[in-house]
Structure formats: structure tokens, C-alpha cells
Image: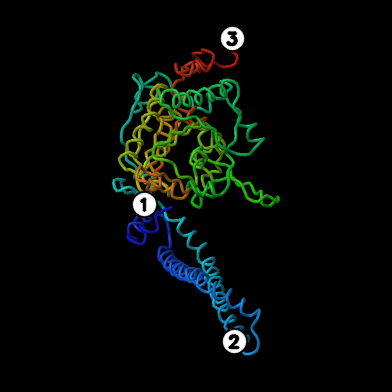
Amino acid sequence: MIDIRQLRENPERFRQGARDKNAEVDFDRLLALDEERRAILQKLETARAEQNKLSKEIGPQIGKLKGQLKSAEGAARTAAEAQLAELEAKPMALKGEVATLEDALRLVEPHWNDLLLRVPQPPAGDVPKGPDSSGNKELRTWHPAGFDPSKSFRDNKGFAPRTHLELVKELGLADFERGVKMSGTRHYILTGMGMRLHQAVLRYAFDHMVEKHGFTAVGVPVIVKEECMQGTGFFPFGREQAYHIEESARGSGHDLFLTGTGEVGLMGIHADEILPESALPLTYTTVSTCFRREAGAAGKDTAGLYRIHQFDKVEQVVVCKADDAESRAWHARMLGYVEEILQSLGLPYRLLQCCTGDLGMKNEDMIDVECWMPGRGEAGKDGAPTGEYGETHSASRLGDYQCRRLNLRYKDADGKTHFAWALNNTVIASPRVLIPLLEIHQNADGTVNIPEPLRPHLGGRTKIEPPTKRA
């Protein structure tokens, strides 16, 4: 959520921010509702203040008149009764005025709040402008010695690559047919070494964040209330991507939603809290199952493990002070943790600076990490895929956008309260990361080498072999 005061002071900044993100927001309607709401609130405040003032002033008078009525007779009694009725009528009139204003506020506020929640976070000033992902800028690349993505896989390895679809079938790592039978399209079963490899990369990444970089390990719910999805900025923008559990239809007080990232639960922990500045930064990591409907993605990456409805992810979240330099420093540091992991696994990758049109509604800045996947891309002259980068990570700076929606604040040394700032980044997501892992480390005989950091989690194995070759 944006700061409404900033919108009043500089509406063009937010109008331009929405245009840059291809978002449609009725700012004229929002500003008109905001003016109407403020006018009602001002009248309401005045009426309530008058109520309090009257209560203090006429309370004793009413008490005195009621005492006089006990012994008054004739004209004196009539006069006292008239005076008492006049005094009692004043607060009743104000009570009616307050009720009318409260009704008016109840009519205006939901529409005002709904529009306010739809205003995107304006991009940071140094984010390049662009209509969509085509405007993203490559920042840097990395590849291990002996494998250069600018050359064909055959030139690098001396043989044509198998795709991950071929590898998982030949090595008995996944069963797509039975997964679809059980749950429909974009579902799968990981089997044998496929499941073990999946668990190994998650455990390695999780331990990397906790043991090497001191992040606090946290287990969070993956089924949350709507307020948590809204507070983290996934509603209303991405509502169509979430799985909805309609508990209200079964008599429960509220519906629930399956989260698409551990970020939702990690950020929701301190909603509506005021933390001491000394508690910051919060550095949390979790591993959780994630669910995404992938609505609107039909026909795109539908085969295999790339775009699926259920996966597991190690996520990192940082909540820091309201300071741009500190936020940027954490952004670079969080990306560095990911690069350490990818380099240790020998996976070629590149960093992309996302342009304004590809930021998403809640981010002021975002850098994607894409791993090289030999099995993607068009077929080359030899009939083998030419390879292509595919997104595996995304690191975002959100300013105070999420914390303002969650009402997550901190108190500085002077006792002043501020909204905290937030960042998040994927540490690793599996089974998508298994695609480059299997394809990069495959051998001509169909086996796959296991990167050294994963071997302790796989019983010391150095290679994945077809079931018939295993000892």
C-alpha cells in the first residue's frame, strides 16, 4: 500500500508509476473519494468533540435539574422539565448526526480502500523503462570453466544433450503420467533419486542460509487468511493465481488461501507489530511447499518440471530500517547468497535487471536470476535444442509497500515510529532447478554427475545412473 499523503502531494509520481507498470488505476476516482472521506472524517471528529464537550458541560446541569424535579411543583416543575428536555435533546441530535456520518463513512471507505490497494509501488528512479520482459537488461553472467553457454552443448561436451524430460524418464526420476492421473495437468511424481535430489538441493540451500549466513530458520503456514495475502501485496493483483479454500461456505468465519511463496508467511509473522529498532534487521529463511494456479499460462512451458502447480522453495526475507542505502546493500547481499549456491553447483547463470513493465505491482526494483538450460530453445542444425536461459530466482526490493499494508513498524531511539522496509529473494526452488542441474551435468552415457555439495545429502553418491545400472 502506498502512503496516501504522498499521493495527495504528488499524484503524478503515482500516475506515472502505474503507467510504467502497465497498471490501470482510476486515480481521479480515488482522489475524489479521498477528499470525500477526509471531509466526512473532519465532520465526524468535530461532532464527536462536541459530544464530549456537551457531556462535560450539561451532565452536571441535567443532574441538578433532576434533583430539583423531586421537590418542584406547578410552574417551577414545568419550567424545569422544559429545560431538562432541551438539554437532553442536544446530545440526542449530535448522536444522530454522528450516526449519519458513520453511515456515510461506511459507504465511502470500502471503495476508497479497494482503489488504494490497487495502486502499484512506483519503480525506483534508476529502474530502466520498458513495456515487458523484452526491456530487461543483462547485468552479468557466470559459467564454470569448461562450459560456455555461448557455444552449443555439443561443442562444450562433445555430444548432443538430452532434455530433462528424457533424463528423468531414463533415470527413473519422475512420473508425469501418474501425476496427471492423480491431480491433472502440470502435476508430477518425483521418484527414487529424483525425490532424493530434490530434497538434497533444498537442504543444501537451507543450511547455506542458516549455517553460513546466520538467517533464522522459520517454519510458517502455507494456508493463510486473505488479510495475509493482501498484506503482502499478492491480492488483489495476483488473486487469480492463488488456490482458494472456501471455508466460509462450510460455516467457518473466513476463507483460506494456499501460498505461492514462503514470503507470505515470513512477512505475516510481525503484522500489526511495533518492533524496537534494535531488533532489525530481521533475516528469516524457510522451506515450504508452494502452490500456483498458473492461470493464463496455457501453452507456455507446459511440459516437464518448469511451470507446475506445486513445488518447494527455500525463501529468504529481510526486514530492515527505512533506509534506501541499507535496502540496496541487502539486495546485493541476498543476490550474492544465490550466486554462491549456483556457482558451487556449477550452474551457468545470468542476472537480469527487470524493467518497469516486468517489475510486478509490489516491487520498486527486481533482479531475476536465470540458469542456462541446454534442453530449452529451438532445435539447432543437428536437431538438438540450442539451449536457453530460464528464470530460477527473483530478488525484490519493496520499500515500505508490504510493511505499510501489514502495519509492520519499528520505533527508533527517539521514540519515533516508522514503517519498516522489506526485501525477498528465492534461495532455491525445486524441482525447477533440477532442470539445469540434470542437463548441465549429464554425461554421454545418460548418467548425471552429482555436484560435490549435494553428495553428503545423497549418501556420498557421485553419479545418478539408470535403475538397471545401480548397485
Q: Mark 3 points at which residue?
A: 471
Whether residue 219 sits left or right of residue 326 in the image: it is right
Residue 152, by quadrant, is top left
Q: Mark 1 points at which residue?
A: 122
The residues tagged by marks 3 and 2 sit, at their Cα atoms, a distance apart of 108 Å
Q: Which of 334 and 189 is in front in this view?
A: 334
Query: Of tags 2 and 1, which is closer to the observer?
Result: 2
Mark 2 and mark 1 lie on one chain; the one further toward the N terminus is 2
Q: Which structural element holds mark 2? A: helix
Estimate the x, y position of residue 217 in percent, counting from the top left. 50, 29
Residue 323, by quadrant, is top left
Vertically, is 368 above or below 158?
below
Q: What residue type is labelled 3?
A: Ala
Estimate the x, y position of residue 151 in percent, counting from the top left. 34, 26
Instruction: Give the crowd class for mark 1: few <14, some 14-19, many >=20 residues within 10 Å.
Output: many
Query: Of tags 3 and 2, which is closer to the observer?
Result: 2
Vertically, is 100 above or below 383?
below
Q: Name the residue under label 2.
A: 79
Q: Which structural element holds mark 3? A: loop
The residues tagged by marks 2 and 1 sit, at their Cα atoms, a distance apart of 66 Å
Kindly give the residue lying farthest to the right in the view shown: 250
Q: Which structural element holds mark 1? A: loop
Question: Which numbered circle lies on residue 297?
Answer: none
Kindly give the residue lying farthest to the left in the view shown: 126
The residues tagged by marks 1 and 3 sit, at their Cα atoms, a distance apart of 58 Å
Q: Which amino acid does label 1 sit on?
A: Pro
Estimate the x, y position of residue 312 in percent, counting from the top left. 54, 32
Q: What residue type is labelled 2?
A: Ala
Query: Of tags 1 and 3, which is closer to the observer?
Result: 1
